[in-house]
Amino acid sequence: MLSVLARAASRLGVGVPSHLVRPVVGLQLSIRSTAHQEGLPKLPVPPLKQTCERYLAMLEPLVTEEELEHTRALVAEFLRCGGVGERLQRGLERRARKTENWLSEWWMQSAYLDSRMPVAVYTSPGVVLPQMHFQDRQGQMRFAAKLIAGVLDFKQMIDNETLPVEYLGGKPLCMDQYYQVLTSCRIPGPKKDTMVNYGTGKMPSTHITVVHNFQFFVLDVYNSDGTPLTVDQIYMQLEKIWNSSLQTNKEPIGILTSNHRNTWGKAYNNLIKDKTNKESVRAIQKSIFLVCLDAPMPRVSEDIYYSKVAAQMLHGGGSRWNSGNRWFDKTLQFIVGEDGSCGLTYEHAPAEGPPIVFLVDHVVEYMKRTEMVRAPMIPLPMPQKLRFNITPEIKKDIEKAKQNLNIMVHDLDVRVLNFSHYGRKCLKSFKTSPDAFIQMALQLAYYRMYKMCCPTYESASLRMFKLGRTEAIRTTSTESVKFVQAMDDQSKQNSEKMALLENAVKAHRTYTHTAIHGQAIDRHLLGLKMQGIEDLTSLPEIFMDTSYAVAMHFNLFTSQVGSKTDCVMCIGPMVPDGYGVCYNPMDDHINFAVTAFNSCEDTNATKLSRCLEDALLDMNSLLEQTAKPAE
Ligand code: COA
């Protein structure tokens, strides 16, 4: 069990000091209701003056001196004794005293449920797993059956509250997100969405949803005595589903869930007017998770295979391919393609990437050790096929959703880069932080492409705090700018470049520390803004300032999601002229997924990933050339 904990912590990039690896972790430690969860500190409200000073420092490399001067004046006014800043800060502190986490509800609303963009591509990440080489359809079914059994095995740890507590920097993390990812679903609304979780009631769900050829099935995954079905049993049930969904001319009802949320919200209300449709939708929403048995993707050359799979995970490939084989509102959807393309997509509102990949790591380990167990001879009932009555109006909604989705599919530019020259181990041997080094390589790649730096977001975990989610690490700093400018400057010596790289890495580590300890600026600024909205006061001018708009326009939206499994997460860009970059630093290589929009002439995912590869190679040469001889 200790090794599980150490692995979990090492995935999060922290060594667990031996005195913190407490033997209580394991057997019956309740991770939710007991001392662990209750003992977590509350998310602090940082001091107002500190945030304002850090805000101005963050702006320095991003805005002009004139803009900065203007912002300084606005900040001074905001901070004025007895002014609006003080009032909002007091409101926030009051809220912090009264709630478990002053931010979590606002964050869920503002970052996810209020957003009207489609969840596919815009907020739901995809995870690309290594390609499987199925010999036949049975191979695909066997893989899917084992995968389902693996997720149920993980669920058991959640249900029994025996999941080992994760640690970051020696501190225990909030485990609440693990309770939100199974048996939950997002419900569209015409103005805003809601989340439902069916995992906690008196009658917890006992079924999953399986979708094949756009047809949805309820698959009960527990026997009447409460034991989970064996891999053999699941396999036989999947076979039945496959055989009764061979027709390929079905309406791709699931494609409705890929639409803009207002449009889907309206279509949803129309769809569930019909009793049968309502029951079918409820069955999907209530299911523990979804498994998509996908048709093969179009064949592509080996060098872009994983890029295609990443796109497949993000949006399903379009209405002619697998996009109708999804229910994008569902929190967890595992995807098993006939051609061996595998992975998952998840709806982001209830959880971040790390708990999802921790689950994936568990499932992958489970699948390695599980052999088919002979099923008991008791025949199981046929999984129930979910029926939909398609009225002309629903048909019209589906056609519109298809059109919108296909536009989105054509617009998304995805490139997976398997950087094979070195990984975490090598960077650690050079006594540098792999995460900060990779972030600097991204800064250099972007600078080489655009001859300028841009606002950059990296996700940092706030799970040291109760119900904590994420904070932004602002990678672009005065130090990072000096480094990228120097790197290609012929007049500079390597030793000077190296010193600038070290400074930039150090600045990044400092920001990371600030962020994970709840003292960074982005969530605090959001809180002050939300407090203003709640108080119905007019929005303070600092939020209507050009500098604020510039700072919030993240051309580089990045996230490290490390795992034991050789996989990579992918996310869409945050802004129309930006990039989404996810990476998984493994011991000896690094997996990257870069996305951009084709509709933006200035961005190009392939080009950025090439520049990134060059930057990583050049920076490694710099490390090697300036390495101090071993003493
Ligand atoms: N010399 C030697 N080793 C070093 C080092 C140095 N100077 N600096 C760091 N390392 C080691 C660390 O000890 C760690 O070792 P381990 O693998 O044995 O545990 C390893 O390098 C990784 O550290 P680093 O690369 O610095 O990153 P990190 O683990 O601190 O991660 C974040 C940084 C920001 C990614 C992490 O704190 C975090 O918040 N993760 C969650 C992000 C998230 O939620 N993303 C999902 C959004 S959907």
Image (cartoon, helix red, strand yellow):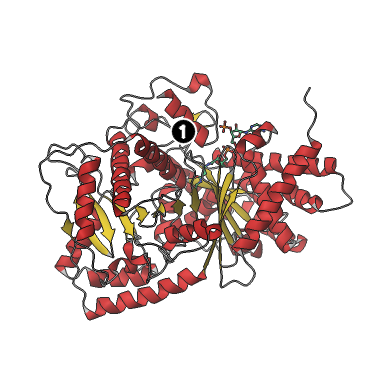
> What secondary structure is found at the residue carrying circle 1?
helix
Residue designated by label 1: 8
Front residue of 285 and 357: 357
Q: In which quarter of the image is ligand 1?
A: top right
Question: Which quadrant of the view contains residue 259?
Answer: bottom left
Q: What residue type is labelled 1?
A: Ala
Residue 110 shows up from this direction: no
Q: Residue furthest front?
A: 135
Q: Which residue lies furthest to the left in this view?
A: 378
Front residue of 54 and 243: 243
Front residue of 186 and 614: 614
Residue 379 shows up from this direction: yes
Q: Which residue lies furthest to the right in this view?
A: 491
Question: Which quadrant of the view contains residue 549?
Answer: bottom right
Residue 173, percent from left and from top: 45, 34
User: Which residue shows up at 33% across the image and 77% down it?
Assistant: 399
Residue 292, percent from left and from top: 32, 56
Q: Quadrant of the C terminus?
A: top right
Residue 244, percent from left and from top: 19, 61
Q: In which quarter of the image is the N terminus?
A: top left
For residue 353, above or below residue 541 = above
- Left or right for 172, reference 503: left
- Left or right for 438, reference 377: right
User: Which residue shows up at 71% across the image and 51% down it?
Assistant: 615
Residue 134, percent from left and from top: 37, 51
User: Which residue shows up at 62% across the image and 34% down it?
Assistant: 425
Characterize the local packing of mark 1: few (<14), some (14-19) or many (20 or more) Cα atoms within 10 angstroms: many
